[in-house]
Amino acid sequence: MVGDWPEQFVAIARIVKPQGRRGEVAAEILTDFPARFDSLRQVFLERPDRQPDSAVVESAMTHKGRIILKFAGIDSIDNANRLRSLHVLIRREERRELPAHHYYVSDLVGCRVITKHGRYRELGVVTEVEPTGGVDLLHIRRPGGREFLIPLAEALCTRIDPEGKLIVVEPPEALLDLNP
């Protein structure tokens, strides 16, 4: 990717296919705030190896768990098909504010994870946050490539600082023994 633009944007949808004959597209919703599409008019479309393109949303409606989007200037199935697999982006600062102790997954990935059992010890870096339907799991890659899991629970993750890219954990020693 060119430049630092990826850090400026976040994906809220991924275009799956054309929908209809007038250039609409069906997109997978990637945001926890799908109501944002009701008033969304300006977005950006991901473009490989270059700055995203600005796009105007003419209409948006949910249909069968997806969002159907109509962009200005996209008026045919062929034009809509060219958008297939592209991400619909917004500027990072346009994200919704989250309540206390809630975090965007994209902010947690890349955080260093350390433990404070008597002394600070580097455990690794978050590579993924796995939703479980209950407590999400942090996938942590140790130096050397081994990976282990720690629940993303307040009792275990005592300090989460996404801006500083740091998570301090205090898991039971037995959990750390399972993941040498």
Image (cartoon, helix red, strand yellow):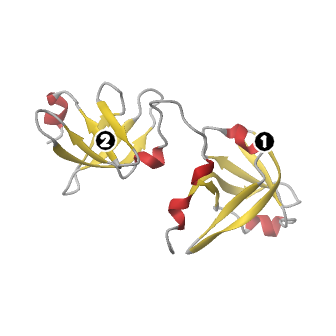
Please identify the quarter of the rendering in which residue 33 is found. Answer: top right
Q: Position of residue 63 (x, y in %)?
A: 77, 41
Count of number-bearing discs: 2
Residue type for callout 1: Asp
Residue type for callout 2: Ile
Quadrant into which the C terminus falls: top left
Name the residue located 84 percent from the left edge and 62 percent from the top edge.
72
In the rendered view, would you say 159 is above or below 83? above
Please identify the quarter of the rendering in which residue 144 is found. Answer: bottom left
Q: Earlier in the sequence, mark 1 or mark 2?
A: 1
- Can residue 48 be seen here? The reply is yes
Q: To which residue does mark 1 refer?
A: 38
Dot 2: element: strand
Q: To which residue does mark 2 refer?
A: 167
Separation of residues labelled 1 and 2 (CA atoms)? 35 Å
Name the residue located 71 percent from the left edge and 44 percent from the top edge.
66
- Asked whether, in this view, residue 89 is left or right of residue 149, the answer is right
Q: Position of residue 108 (x, y in %)?
A: 40, 45
Dot 1: element: helix
Q: Nearer the viewer, residue 5 or 175?
A: 5
Name the residue located 36 percent from the left edge and 28 percent from the top edge.
153
- Asked whether, in this view, residue 17 is left or right of residue 71, the answer is left
Dot 2: few (<14), some (14–19), or many (≥20) neighbours within 10 Å? some
Name the residue located 19 percent from the left edge and 27 percent from the top edge.
172
